[in-house]
Each structure stands twice: as C-alpha cells, then as structure tokens.
C-alpha cells in the first residue's frame, strides 16, 4: 500500500499528515516521528511512504479548524485500520462536539460497554488521526487532562482553542 506523507505548519507545531485515495490515514505532531512510524506500522503494516504536497481539502480543513471553524474537519474522509472496537471508539470520538469533553468511562458507556473504560483508553491512545478524530476531547473521570500522544500542553491548547472560538460564536 502506498501512503503519501506531507507536513504543514499550525499553531501547535508542524503537523505530519498521511493519506491515500481512501482518505486521511494519520495526523501526528512534529517531534513524534517514532510514534508516527509505530502507529503507521501497527495500523497499515509494511507500506510505502511517499512525500507529497498535502491535498487542499486536508490543508484547508485544518486551517479552518485553527481559525475557529471546526466543521470542515468533521467532513474529512478518514480511512483507519483497526479492530472493530477501535473503529467504534474512533467513530464515537468524532461525535464529541468541539469544546466538549467526555471521560473514558462516559465514552465506554456511550458505546454500550460500561466496564470497558481501560479498553477505550487503549483505543483512544492508538488513534492515528489526531485533531480530526478528536481524542483530545477525552479526559480522566476526575476531569484531569490525562495522556495525549501530542503531549498534555497540546491537548490543553486544543481544548482552550475550541472553547474560546465557540464562546466567541455564541456571544
């Protein structure tokens, strides 16, 4: 399988995107190359990574997100490989509205698996498509900002960014 890889600047650092004709395959942060390659290999096996310019639909949607318009990323096609449970978790993540958070337990409950909060956490942690599949919106049961592949400061920035822009839209 050939997957194209490109980079773009953002307010949270350089983003690494991977895609093919099926859709977005990965989105990770600069400086997390080992994590990126580990996720790519675990989800897609041996694949050919080819440098390319990021398609306009991806770059425009992400630019809109960082400008405060969150809806374009919701419409991006994603194509992730994972177990049926991971796929269900990642689909549920895309249903969490911007500036809203949900605990791992709440997400497990939403999936009809109330005892599976740890499994939800593992699936959340193996999400290869940051921001677009918004794993940053999942928090600890006590409201704490727990684990995020891009680092807690980025998770905090993304949540504050969403809250700030949604508050501006409402007022």
Image (cartoon, grey):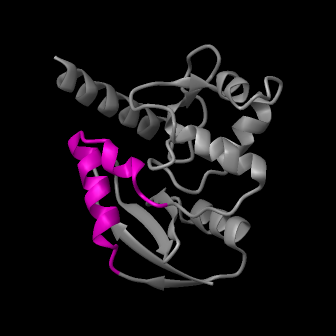
Query: Is most of the magenta stretch helix, strand or loop?
Result: helix
- Judge by depth and name the residue closer to the eye, 44 or 112: 112
On the image, the x and y values in percent for residue 36 come to: 57, 64
Q: Is residue 46 above or below residue 100?
A: below
Residue situated furthest right in the rendering? 115
Residue range (magenta): 53-77
Q: Quadrant of the N terminus?
A: bottom right
> Residue 118 appears at what percent x and percent y?
78, 32
Expressed as whole percent of the image width and height from the top left, the position of residue 107 reads 65, 28
Q: Quadrant of the C terminus?
A: top left
Q: Is residue 156 magenta?
A: no
Identified at 69% across, 65% down, the residue is 43
Q: Residue at x 56, y 24 (%)?
A: 102
Identify the residue at image location x=30%, y=33%.
161
The reply, left or right, for residue 7 in relation to residue 135 is: left
Closer-to-camera residue (88/34)? 88
Residue 12 % position (x, y): 34, 48
Q: Is residue 79 above or below residue 127?
A: below
- Residue at the farthest top position: 142
Q: Residue at x 79, y 29 (%)?
A: 113
How many marks the image carries: the answer is 0
């Amino acid at each position: 399988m050939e997957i194209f890889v490109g980079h773009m600047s953002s307010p949270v650092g350089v983003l690494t995107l991977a895609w093919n004709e099926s859709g977005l395959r990965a989105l990770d942060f600069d400086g997390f190359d080992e994590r990126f390659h580990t996720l790519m290999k675990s989800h897609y096996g041996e694949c050919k990574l080819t440098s390319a310019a990021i398609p306009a639909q991806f770059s425009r949607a992400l630019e809109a997100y960082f400008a405060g318009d969150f809806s374009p990323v919701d419409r991006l096609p994603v194509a992730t490989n994972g177990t049926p449970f991971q796929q269900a978790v990642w689909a549920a993540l895309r249903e969490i509205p911007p500036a809203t958070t949900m605990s791992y337990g709440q997400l497990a409950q939403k999936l009809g698996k109330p005892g599976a909060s740890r499994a939800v956490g593992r699936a959340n942690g193996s999400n290869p498509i940051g921001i677009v599949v918004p794993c940053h919106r999942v928090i600890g049961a006590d409201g704490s900002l727990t684990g995020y592949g891009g680092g807690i400061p980025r998770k905090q920035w993304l949540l504050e960014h969403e809250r700030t822009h949604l508050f501006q839209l409402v007022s």
